[in-house]
Amino acid sequence: MPDRTVVTQNPTSTEGDRLERLDISLVILPLASPISDAKVSTGRQKPLTEVAFLFVEAETAQGHQGLGFSYSKRAGGPGLFAHACEIAPNLIGEDPNDIGRLWTKLVWAGASVGRSGLATQAIAAFDNCLWDCKAKRAGLSLGKLLGVHRDSVACYNTSGGFLSTPIEVLLDNIDRSLEAGIGGIKIKVGQPDWRVDLKRLEAVQKRLDGRAALMVDANQQWDRPTALRMGRAMELFGLTWIEEPLDAYDAEGHAALAAALDTPIASGEMLTSAAEHLELIKLNAVDIIQPDAPRVGGISQFLRVATFADQKGLGLAPHFAMEIHLHLAATYPREPWVEHFDWLDPLFNERQEIKGGRMILSKRPGLGVTLSEKCRAWTRARDSFAR
């Protein structure tokens, strides 16, 4: 599609750099095999077969470049792309360094569709892109630009432990993960028969034999009484956390559960605004907060959540998108976790280094990733905006 020329009027200032061009693309990443969690077993959702990505690539008048992305599972990809194309012209001619002001400008450009959900997830791709550009301008990794507390982050693996994975394969996946240097293993729970969950958990704990941390994720499967019963039954496993035991928006239920159990409660990945995370934090609903930068509105909003969480003394374990979250977790004052997912590997030319149970912060500028030829080939839609 040819470039859309954007006429800019009255830019904020007449000095400094300017955004000259934005390229927006919708990419559909096929998964190697269908993925199922508790929401599939109850019929709420179908198995996951692909993930939609919204990429934003920026170029400035001074020749600086940025790359950012957001994503959607099962549905929403075309919607993200459409909204991104609607609001993109608002950035042309603007100073890319004014990230906070530009986030607000994009929110108000689409104010009638709200400040959460699809709207903020579309904005996230722009926000992440601007942060990548700013770090590259400084010649620093994003983590170093923001200010890290550590050069590596403890990492755990989820992609090998879905409910659709037979127990024999799950155990083999654990062995491969540990051999690759992974420091924690998370498996999905929430089977219709709770005894199956406990049987799988026993087998996993036996295979781990204390070599790595163990977490479980119920994907919002349980009601309050079931979550309490299952939480008590799982206390003896010494879990690092129980994730999303209840509906993601049931902050009061999570608070009651967190107060009743010794095992830490983790949640937050499905929330799509800083305000929604603040509700969890204010109510003492979680011990470990799990914001997702692409979902919550980008790096700018993630940092707001992290500040709230640190003030409450919470743990941090960002959801998915390790290419972004490694940098952000490294800046958290308290020792965090980062989630290892190899699903996104085909999209990028670079790989994250893992050693001794930890993911190593890249020294490459910005996010430290570039788009692969496969990623370009999976592009379903593309639009460009230029001054």
Image (tube, rainbow, N blue to C red):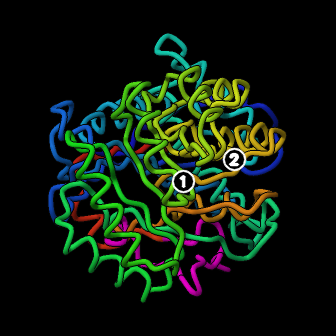
Disc 2 packing (10 Å; few <14; some 14–19; many ≥20):
many
User: Is residue 297 positioned above or below 113 on the image?
Assistant: below
Q: Is residue 367 visible?
A: yes
Residue 41 in picture, x, y percent from top left: 17, 40
User: Is residue 22 positioned above or below 374 on the image?
Assistant: above
Residue 201 in picture, x, y percent from top left: 35, 61
Q: Quadrant of the C terminus?
A: top right
> Where is residue 127, by image quadrant?
top right
112 lies left or right of 2:
right
User: Within the magenta stretch, is there residue 21?
Assistant: no
Location of mark 2 (residue): 96
Q: Residue at x 43, y 54 (%)?
A: 216
Q: Residue at x 17, y 52 (%)?
A: 49
User: Within the magenta stretch, is there residue 362?
Assistant: yes
Q: Are marks 1 and 2 in contact (CB under 8 Å)?
A: yes
Magenta region: which residues? 344-369
Location of mark 1 (residue): 58
Which amino acid type corresponds to the residue marked 1 in the rendered image?
Ala
Check disc 2 and report its element: helix, strand or loop. Answer: loop
Q: Nearer the viewer, residue 61 or 288?
A: 288
User: Is residue 9 positioned above or below 170 on the image?
Assistant: above
Check disc 1 and report its element: helix, strand or loop. Answer: strand
Disc 1 packing (10 Å; few <14; some 14–19; many ≥20):
many
Whole-angstrom CA distance, mark 1 to mark 2, is 9 Å
Which amino acid type corresponds to the residue marked 2 in the rendered image?
Pro
